[in-house]
Amino acid sequence: MSDTGQTLKTGTVIDDKWVILEFIAKGGMGEVYRAHQLNLKRDVAIKVISREWLASIEDDEEELELGLMRFRNEVKAMAQVRHPNVLGIYDYGSFVPQEGETGTVLEYIVMEYIPGSTLRETMPEEGFYPNEEATVNWLKRYFFPVLDGVEELHKFGTIHRDIKPENILLDRDIPKIADFGLARSCMLESVTQSIDMKGTPAYMAPEQFLDFKRTDERTDIYALGKILYEAITGKIKPTSIPFKSVGIDSPDTEFFKELDKIIREATVEDKSKRTRSVAELRKALINAIENWEAKRNQIAYPIGKKNEKSLAKEIFIVSTLAGAVLLIGLYWFGHSIFNHQNIHSSKSTVTKVANEGAGETTETTGKSVKNVAQLPKIIEGKDGAKLRLVPEGTLRLAKDRAENVKEMITIPAFYMDETQVTNHQFVDFLNTMLPELTVEKGVVKKGKDVWYLLGEVKEGYEPVIFRERRFLVSSPSHASCPVVRVSALGAEAYASYYGRRLPTAEEWAYAYISGKKLTDGNNKKSKAGSRKSSPSVSRQPRYHMDMHMEMMRNIVPEKNVEVPPKPEKLPFPTPVLLYPANTYGIRGLNINISEWVQAAYEKPSGNKRSPQFGIMGNAINPSRGDSRLGKPLRREPWEAFEEVGFRCALSAEEYLRQTGNEKMAK
């Protein structure tokens, strides 16, 4: 971008610390640049008072002083707040540009540099209405964090007065409130009304336009209500009348009727009748979401009275399994401790070989091996996990796949964890990485990457706790149960640390399909006839993901491969070794817990690249005549869910490379 008309040129060094890299944007009196901080080797954003603005008011000393006061107030307002959803400030100062006129002093603010987009990009042009699920997801993912940031500002007595989608930056998917040029705090110096009568009319409360002195927290509430209205109904048109209350026209569901009421109360023109605080607005939205989720779950999973015989059967099953849970948990806990020194010794190699026979002989193509018969059926990872060999095979792709994808694909031989990663294994990993992790409000992060969410998975079940700067499994009986509420980033970090990776969606689908019928007779008919499904005692998760809405349409097994019968559900949580095994000895595929996979094979749609991670499992419908598996449910890598865990995989080629047998690979 040309430097013409800009106050600072590329390469300008400010106070021997910041080098200007590029111009970003210009406002009424300021300009924003990307710069590099030399001593800390990081990029920052620098806002300076523009020379153009200074020249425009050089004969008006009063206007100059008021402008400078407003700029300094922005610094003070930002410096008071430290919150993950508010843009951070690093420094403030003044300097004389080397190439500028002598005596020209420019003031500047050094801030967090956020290279991403703004909240505007998360809001469809036509609005979310009438899609209830998309609206709920947006509220949880983006709007609630914005409320958190605004609430923090209000705690310090700061009123932003220019909240709009363009002033909410996205650091990946983390909203950060920016642009405090119009902020007013009870602790800051007063600026005259002529300067403060600024803002964006579409989001500006009536009192801000009529009488600046009347602005308070409810002024920001009005703007938040307008953003919510715009997200649901579509972009506010330039012809829309500003400063007026808004609402959803003729909402046709209970959920949108509740949201309509919330929006109207947040944008009431008379602020004495307006929603009083961010906490009140948040509470109303949470109630609306909880009512929607309860109604949806009741429809999807109707609750009926159980007869005494059914209840007695459930109690018997639960009691029996509870005993097994404790025994297996104690065994697995002891076994894991025995292998503890092997778990932490390295992160680059996988394996010790457990020679239990060889796989089938197969001549393969692509990234596979010359003779699968020479591969061990089982290898052992550094985390103590057993990996089972899945021989090479093919999957037939459905006709609605992307045109550049072949109809039949080959799945080279690979290894897959026999079980999902357990609570104990993941806790071991977290403690190994502890110096690099932060734990805040139950969220475990490495840097800005969310890895894991602490807390109850279901009522009475909180498998992992954080006490005295260490992660612990809360009970020995939980140690060998599948870990859940792990993000794709956390799962990928675990796999990488132990020299493995997440399976691809195709590998997961092929392992499930070609595994054929279960080997433990779990789905065989008994002498008395077909077995009925055992009842599940787990309640629905708080944020239920309806996998059946993303039916797996894109992967079809080869005709001579049967889709295994859908296995019976087990109570949750259940130790991983109690899950039935398929032909390969892999346990628990598609039972209770869904799993993270790599999903990069899908072609990006439009200008938006699909997330590279997805979720497989709990979406198989064997009653369908075409016996299809489907595409993964794509989710963002930082998301974590109560019913999603993971297991690891390793290509046969990579195993050979790690064990020094590269010559066996083609």
Image: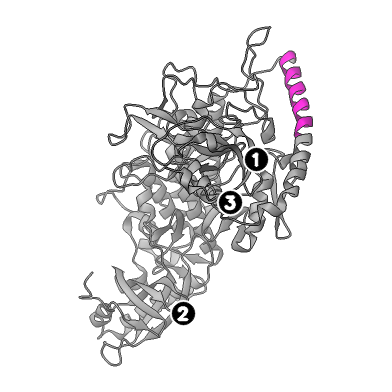
Q: Nearer the viewer, mark 1 or mark 2?
A: 1
Q: Nearer the viewer, mark 1 or mark 3?
A: 1
| Dot placed on the residue nearer the N-terminal end, 1 or 3 | 1
Question: Quick one: SS at disc 2?
Answer: loop
> Residue 411 falls in which quadrant of the image?
top left
What's the CA distance linking mark 3 and mark 2?
35 Å
In the picture, the quarter occupied by the C terminus is top left
Q: Is residue 610 left or right of residue 616?
A: left
**Magenta segment, prevailing SS (helix, strand or loop):** helix
Question: Residue 384, image x and y in percent?
Answer: 66, 45
**What amino acid does circle 3 point to?**
Tyr
What's the CA distance linking mark 1 and mark 2?
52 Å
Question: Quick one: SS at disc 1?
Answer: strand
Front-most of residues 346 and 665? 665
Question: Residue 226, image x and y in percent?
Answer: 39, 50
Question: For residue 498, which numbered disc appears in the image?
Answer: 3
> Residue 324 falls in which quadrant of the image?
top right
Q: Nearer the viewer, mark 3 or mark 2?
A: 3
Q: Residue at x 48, y 28 (%)?
A: 548
Q: Residues within 10 Å of mark 3 (few under 14, many from 20)?
A: many
**Residue at the top extreme?**
528
Q: Which residue is mark 2?
A: 39
Question: For residue 329, which numbered disc appears in the image?
Answer: none
Question: Residue 658, image x and y in percent?
Answer: 53, 50
Q: Is residue 244 visible?
A: no
Is 655 rendered above or below residue 512? below
Q: How is the image coloured?
A: one colour
Is 634 rendered above or below residue 182? above
Report the magenta residues as a range: 309-325
